[in-house]
Image (cartoon, rainbow, N blue to C red):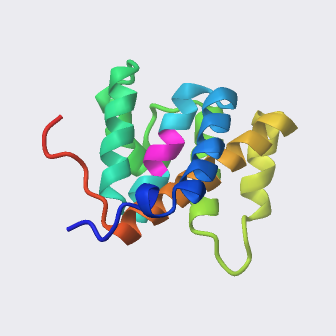
Amino acid sequence: MQRMNAAEVAPEAYQAVLGLEKYVRANVDHTVLELVKLRASMLNGCAYCVDMHSTDALRAGESSRRLFAVAAWRESPFFDERERTALALTDAVTHLGEHGVPDEVWDAAAKQWSEKELADLVMAIATINVWNRIAVTTRTQPPTEA
């Protein structure tokens, strides 16, 4: 059962996060953005966001095969180098450990993405992690019917 509706209880905070969301939607390639959102949501165990982002990606024309493969992207042949570096960065930022993002992950991403694109990608990863933490903490559930 949902603990609270954060958008109702703290609307100003919700709007601030929504501002980040609007920014990344306007500045990150839509396909990559949905892959990043789905991957972070899987790693964070956010059922609401996994449902939303897989549904959004399917509606936008993404294949179910690629979406299922996000769970095992390292072994999958379905992603190009830019997508792979975005997914690797998503893993590293989402599982941010004691030593931060490894240089090899950052360097690989920096070879594929311009500095501005990389900054926007980091913002996208940070934003989905905020949404995941809100939804998981408040136990927000996906709709039972699509």
The main secondary structure of the magenta stretch is helix
Residue 15 placement (x, y as % from top left):
58, 48
Query: Residue 107, how many percent across, how many down?
Result: 81, 50
- Residue at 30 percent across and 66 percent down: it is 139
Magenta region: 35-39
The question of residue 68 being in magenta is answered with no
Q: Residue at x 13, y 39 (%)?
A: 145
Q: Position of residue 80 (x, y in %)?
A: 58, 30
Q: Is residue 63 left or right of residue 43?
A: left
* Quadrant containing the N terminus in the rendered view: bottom left
Q: Residue furthest left?
A: 145
Whether residue 18 is visible, yes or no, is: yes
Figure check: 64 above or below 10: above
Report the residue at 39% width, 39% height from top: 53
Quarter holding the C terminus is top left
Residue 65 placement: quadrant: top left
The stretch drawn in magenta includes residue 37:
yes
State the residue lying farthest toward the top.
Answer: 61
Residue 11 in picture, x, y percent from top left: 52, 55
Residue at (59, 41) in percent of width and height: 21
Instruction: Decide: is 37 above or below 14.
Output: above
> Camera-side residue: 103 or 96?
96
The residue closer to the viewer here, 126 or 64, is: 126
* Relative vertical location of residue 26 with respect to residue 118 in this rendering, above or below: above
Residue furthest toward the right?
115
From the viewer's side, name the closer residue of 15 and 78. Answer: 15
Classify 121 as above or below 14. above
